[in-house]
Image (cartoon, rainbow, N blue to C red):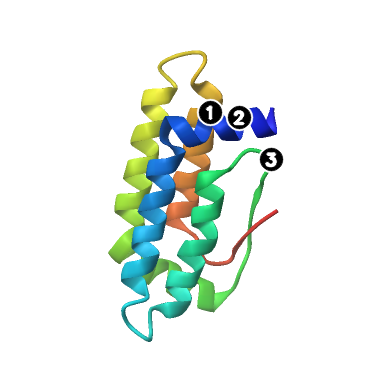
Amino acid sequence: MGCLGNIIWFICGGFVSGLSWLLAGCFWCLTIIGIPIGVQCFKFAGLCFFPFGKEVVYGGGAGSLLLNIIWLLITGIPLAIESAAFGLLLCLTIVGIPFGLQHFKIAKLALMPFGATVR
């Protein structure tokens, strides 16, 4: 399911989601202070392009909490809304449910990306 799921995913919403993360990363990299945040965006863009077979594990400390708060206020909410909307639309059909669940995974990641690792 992993390879076939990733191919169908890329065509049916993963491309748009991944481009959103890449765009967010480019905007964050415009400032020197935002470069670490932009690099994290680029890492998660890879997850958005091909999410099947990957798992997100959350952890982190006080630094991650501070970065997550700044991220949420500036970039996290629009990315989370985009992924949640795609997830809701895809879950309207039985065939789209696995893809909708992947969008919900990415929406959660869009709210708290720092301290998260992808396996």
Quadrant housing residue 54: top right
Quadrant housing residue 32: bottom left
Q: Is residue 77 left or right of residue 1?
A: left
Q: Is residue 63 left or right of residue 27?
A: right
Who is closer to the viewer here, 22 or 109?
A: 22
Residue at the image point whose x is 35% and y is 62% from the top: 24
- Please rate how many residues cluster around mark 2, counting C-alpha atoms within 10 Å: few if below 14, some from 14 to 19, many from 20: some
Asked if the residues shown at circle 2 and circle 3 are in contact, with their CB atoms under 8 angstroms apart, the answer is yes
Please give the label number shown on residue 53: 3
Please give the label number shown on residue 5: 2
In three-dimensional space, the C-alpha distance between marks 2 and 3, rounded to whole angstroms, equals 9 Å
Q: Which residue is mark 1?
A: 8
Of the residues shown, which amino acid type is indicated by label 1? Ile
Asked if the residues shown at circle 1 and circle 3 are in contact, with their CB atoms under 8 angstroms apart, the answer is no
Q: Percent from the top left, x then y, of residue 113?
A: 50, 61
Residue at the image point whose x is 48% and y is 38% from the top: 104
Nearer-N-terminus badge (2/3)? 2
* Between marks 1 and 3 in the image, the one whose residue lies nearer the viewer: 1
- Taking 78 as reference, is 86 above or below it? above
Of the residues shown, which amino acid type is indicated by label 3? Gly
- Tell me the element at label 3: loop
Q: Percent from the top left, x then y, of residue 70?
A: 36, 71
Of the residues shown, which amino acid type is indicated by label 2? Gly
In three-dimensional space, the C-alpha distance between marks 2 and 1, rounded to whole angstroms, equals 5 Å
- Taking 79 as reference, is 96 above or below it? above
Asked if the residues shown at circle 2 and circle 1 are in contact, with their CB atoms under 8 angstroms apart, the answer is yes
- Please rate how many residues cluster around mark 3, counting C-alpha atoms within 10 Å: few if below 14, some from 14 to 19, many from 20: few
- Tell me the element at label 1: helix
- Taking 72 as reference, is 55 above or below it? above
In three-dimensional space, the C-alpha distance between marks 1 and 3, rounded to whole angstroms, equals 14 Å
